[in-house]
Amino acid sequence: MALPGREGDQYVENDQLKKMKEPTTVFIVEDEMLIAACLKDQLQESGFKILGSSTRGEKGIEEVRRLKEEGNEPDIILMDINLRGTMDGIDTARLITDQFNCGIIFLTGQSSRAVYERSFFIKPFGYVLKPYDLEQMVMTIEIAAYQRKLEIENKDIRKKLETLLSGKMKENREVLELYDIITENSLVGIWILQDKGVIFANQAMANLLGFTLEEVIAFSPPDIVKILHPEDQKRLMDITDRRLQGEEVPQHTIFRIITKNKEIRWIKSFVKRIQYLETPALHQTYLDITEQISVNPESTNPAYEKI
């Protein structure tokens, strides 16, 4: 999966992709000043824009707040888990994700299960173990920045679509314009599922599944189940049933699909229960994270489902 913004990639020029061509901005929270200085120099040489650094969690939050007020909220924050002071990296990351829209990548010298499970609830975009490998660090940041941009786009599109569906807009022109935006510019797969099957899908979803858009729209419930990896089917069907019944379940789920050409892809799905024509429906977006999984296999851990 090619990342937009890299030299040589072919893609459609639109406002969202133009933004992706700008350097990814990074803020570093690391209490080892030598490590922080080396990171800054190496990442700058790799094309990233370093907005600053901090050795303490409290100070880091203040700096991120100042940057946001100046219109320079960081794309990515590299967060050392084992910070000195009253707050460690996990506590600091929790406060940052509550207040800001930054992607967190944890830096840690520990690989224990306890550390991973405690940090899962922060919804990090990745982990880098110390001593870090620069190539892996760069790839992790690139994937995290790409995924963060897709999630921001997903939230914006979902908010607009839900407003139209629930507000019963009077002018069909607005619905058609939104449809064009979704199908022509969206970088994530989007569909709406109801008890009889697919009631809406965009071209990106069809491309992800390997089918034509017409084939996807014609999917029946058994067809939808067939694209799910056999080992994930029961878990996902259970979550779907609970969500349709109105239970509180995690909004995102990680699982595998099998495309039309039998390729296995890892998906991060964001789901919202909505009302469509007075009947419960599920608005879902599919984000292909196969490349991220190849870099960070720990992302497939079941503990992620607790997020």
Image (cartoon, rainbow, N blue to C red):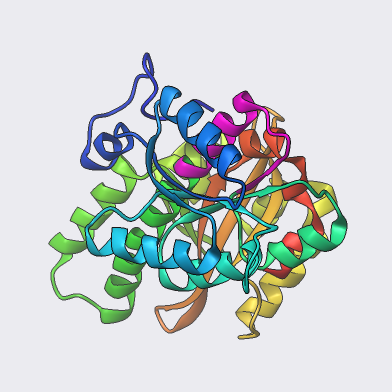
Q: Residue at x 70, y 62 (%)?
A: 120
Q: Residue at x 65, y 63 (%)?
A: 84
Residue 168, above or below 231: below
Q: Quadrant of residue 275?
A: bottom left
Q: Quadrant of residue 271?
A: bottom right
Q: Residue at x 29, y 66 (%)?
A: 160
Q: Residue 291 appears at what percent x and percent y?
A: 62, 33
Q: Residue 258 appears at what percent x and percent y?
A: 70, 39
Q: Is residue 238 at all visible to an observer of this figure?
A: yes
Q: Is residue 282 at all visible to an observer of this figure?
A: no
**Secondary structure mainly formed by the magenta segment:** helix
Quadrant of the drawing holding the N terminus: top right
Q: Nearer the viewer, residue 122 or 147?
A: 122
Number of numbered markers: 0
Q: Residue 179 appears at what percent x and percent y?
A: 28, 53
Q: Nearer the viewer, residue 228 or 7?
A: 7
Q: Is residue 141 magenta?
A: yes
Which residues, given as a range, are shown in magenta? 126-145
Residue 83, above or below 133: below
